[in-house]
Amino acid sequence: MLLALGFVAFTACEDDRDSNPTLTQPTTFVLNEPAITGYVDMEQTATVALTWSQPTPYNNFNAPVVPTYTVQVSPTGQFTKAFDENVEDNAGADFVNVNETYSSGKEANINMQNLNRQLLQLCGWTEATTPDKLPLSVRVKSAVRDASFNEYGVVYSNVVTLNTVPYYVELKPADPEIWWLIGADIADGSWGSDMGKCVIPMQTLDGAEYDIKTGQGEIQWIGYLGGSGFKLRGALDDGWASQWGQGDSFGSYVKNDGGSGNITVPAAGLYKIALNTKSDKLNIEAYDGSAPVYSGMAISGSFNDWGDTEMNACSTGWENHDWYITYTFAAGDEVKIKQAGSWDFNKGGSFVNYSEGMYVYGETNGPNLKMEEGGTYLIFFNDITGYIRFIKQ
C-alpha cells in the first residue's frame, strides 16, 4: 500500500566507525481512548481522530530525531502479521497499516472509507458475511527511518478499542501503476516535479493485463533522450522513496537506491523505456520505429468550434514527442487531439476510466472523445504511441 513516509538519514565516515551515532529511544507511549460514544458508521463517517502522548524524544548524541508514526488496526485483537496488498500470499495476516502515515505530531485523522476497504481485503468479506458490528483493536507504531527506509527504534503504544459498523462495497480493480520520468533529458530538464513542465508519465499498453489488486504490469514510454541523464519515480510526493536509477553502467539498473546514478544513454536518439512493475524489470533500448517531429499539437472539439487550442511541448530544447495542456470542459464536450493547423494527423478513441481521470489508446481518425463529467483536466499526449491521459485536477 502507498504510504507517505518521513525519514532521517544517519551518516558516518567510513574511517570513523567508533563515532557512529547511537540511537536512544523510549520504551512506550500512550494512545488515548477515542472520544467517541457508541459505534462508528464507517460508510457515513469521513474520519476518526486519534491522539497520543508523544514518546520521550528519540535522540542521537543529544540531537533530536523525528520519528514516523503508523496506525495499525486489527479485527482480531492480534498483531501477528501485517496484510500487504502488494503480495499474493497473505496467509496469517491479522492487521493492517492504515494508508496514512505521519511524521512527528501527536494526532491522526483516520479515513474510514479507506480503512473499510483495507478490512474488506484483509477479511475477505462478502455482502453476506460483512459483520453488522465490529470492535477494532488499534495501536500506533513509532519508528525512525534512515535514508533507505530501514526502521530503527520501533516502539508500540497501548491498544485501544474502536467500535465500528463496517459495510460491504464491491472492490474495484486497482489503477495501473504508473511511474514518472524526470531528469535532464526529460521535459524542461530541471528535475522539478511539475507535471508536464518537468515530469512525464509512462504509459499503459493496449491489451496488456494488470494485476487486479496492485495494478502492476508492463508500462512504457517512447521518446527522445539526449544522454544527459534521467531517473524514474514511482510517486512525486514520497521524497524519492520509489525510484529507478543506474548501477555500474548503462544497462544495469537499481530500484529504490538513493545512491544510484542517473540513467545515461550511450548516444542521443529515440529510445523505448519498458518497465514491468510486477517483476521489477527495466529495459531501455533504441527505438527504430516511425517518429515524425511535429511543430505543434492542439486539442479541438465542440468546446472551441473544432478550432485549435494549442498544447505545450514538454521538451523545448530538443526533439519533442510529448505534449500537455490544462483545460476546463463541460459535461458532454467532444474532444480530439490533432496536429496544429491540420487534420492530417489526429487521434480519437474511447476513454478508459480510472480513479484520477481517463486514458485513451489513441486511434487515427478515431471517434470523438466524449466528456462524461465536466471539470478541469491535465492532458498528456505522446505523438509516437498515440497514448492520451486525462488527469482530473
Image (cartoon, rainbow, N blue to C red):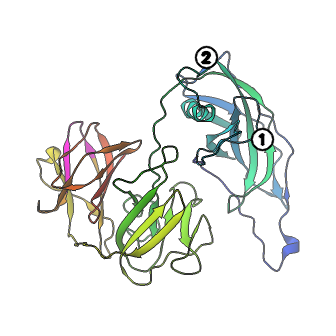
Disc 1: which residue: 54
The answer to whether residue 308 is visible is yes
Instruction: Name above or below for residue 131 compared with residue 16.
Output: above
- Say which of 319 and 345 sits in front: 345
Callout 2: 10 Å neighbours few (<14), some, many (20+)? few
What kind of element bears circle 1? loop
Residue type beneath disc 1: Gln
Q: Which corner quadrant of the image does residue 95 belong to?
A: top right
Q: Residue 365 carries which label?
A: none
Residue drawn at 46 percent across, 40 percent down: 173
Of the residues tagged 2 and 1, which is closer to the observer?
A: 2
Q: Identify the image quadrant of the C terminus.
A: top left
Please state the extent of the stretch shown in magenta in the rendering: 328-337
Disc 2: which residue: 132
- Say which of 32 and 127 sits in front: 127
Q: Can you name the residue that lies furthest to the bottom here?
A: 267
List x then y, in percent, for residue 156. 80, 41
Is the magenta region chiefly helix, strand or loop? Answer: strand
Does the segment drawn in magenta span residue 335? yes
Does the segment drawn in magenta span residue 160? no
What kind of element bears circle 2? loop
- Say which of 13 and 82 sits in front: 82
